[in-house]
Image (spheres, helix red, strand yellow):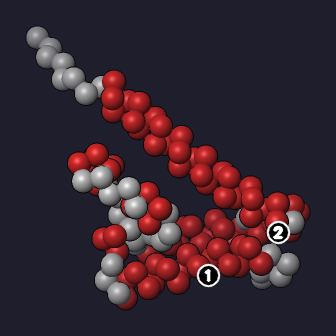
């Protein structure tokens, strides 16, 4: 039950935990939070799209993300480190951009208020 032969998973877990602890210690957690309406549409802070993916802002998110990455070490051992790293980043980016696409699509089509009698 270690990170033997799983260097990418070890790097991801250590980076995740250390970034979250560092953000808490330096009191900069508010930079890693994203509210799409306010930050992206109103103030055009597009840099938050990259910053919010770097760390989690509370201990529960860090715990479950670290446990998920720890359990994915088996997949890394089966696939190999390079293929796992490419697959992990591809899946994460695909999920992120599909979420943004659906949010922008439904935000643009459902902006009118409906009055019911």
Q: Which secondary structure, mark 1?
A: helix
| Residue 113 at least partly seen | yes
View extreme (top): residue: 117
Say how many tags the image has: 2
Nearest the viewer among 103 and 59 is: 103
> Closer to the N terminus: mark 2 or mark 1?
1
Left or right of 72, for residue 94: left
The residue under the point 59% across, 79% down is: 15
How packed mark 1 is, by other alpha carbons closer than 10 Å (few <14, some 14-19, many 20 or more), is few
The image shows residue 66 at horizontal and vertical percentages of 59, 72
Residue designated by label 2: 81
Residue 75 appears anywhere in the view:
no
The residue identified by callout 1 is 14
Query: How far across and how far down the image is residue 53, in percent?
Result: 49, 63
- Identify which residue is drawn at 49% across, 80% down: 19
- Residue 90: x %, y % from top left: 68, 52
């Amino acid at each position: 039950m270690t990170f033997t032969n799983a260097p990418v998973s070890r790097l991801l877990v250590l980076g995740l935990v250390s970034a979250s602890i560092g953000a808490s210690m330096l009191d900069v957690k508010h930079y890693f939070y994203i509210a799409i309406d306010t930050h992206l549409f109103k103030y055009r802070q597009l840099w938050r799209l990259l910053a919010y993916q770097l760390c989690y802002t509370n201990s529960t998110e860090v715990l479950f993300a670290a446990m998920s990455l720890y359990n994915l070490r088996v997949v890394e051992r089966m696939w190999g480190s390079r293929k796992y790293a490419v697959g992990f980043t591809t899946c994460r980016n695909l999920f992120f951009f599909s979420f943004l696409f659906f949010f922008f699509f439904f935000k643009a089509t459902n902006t009118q208020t409906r009055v019911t009698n």
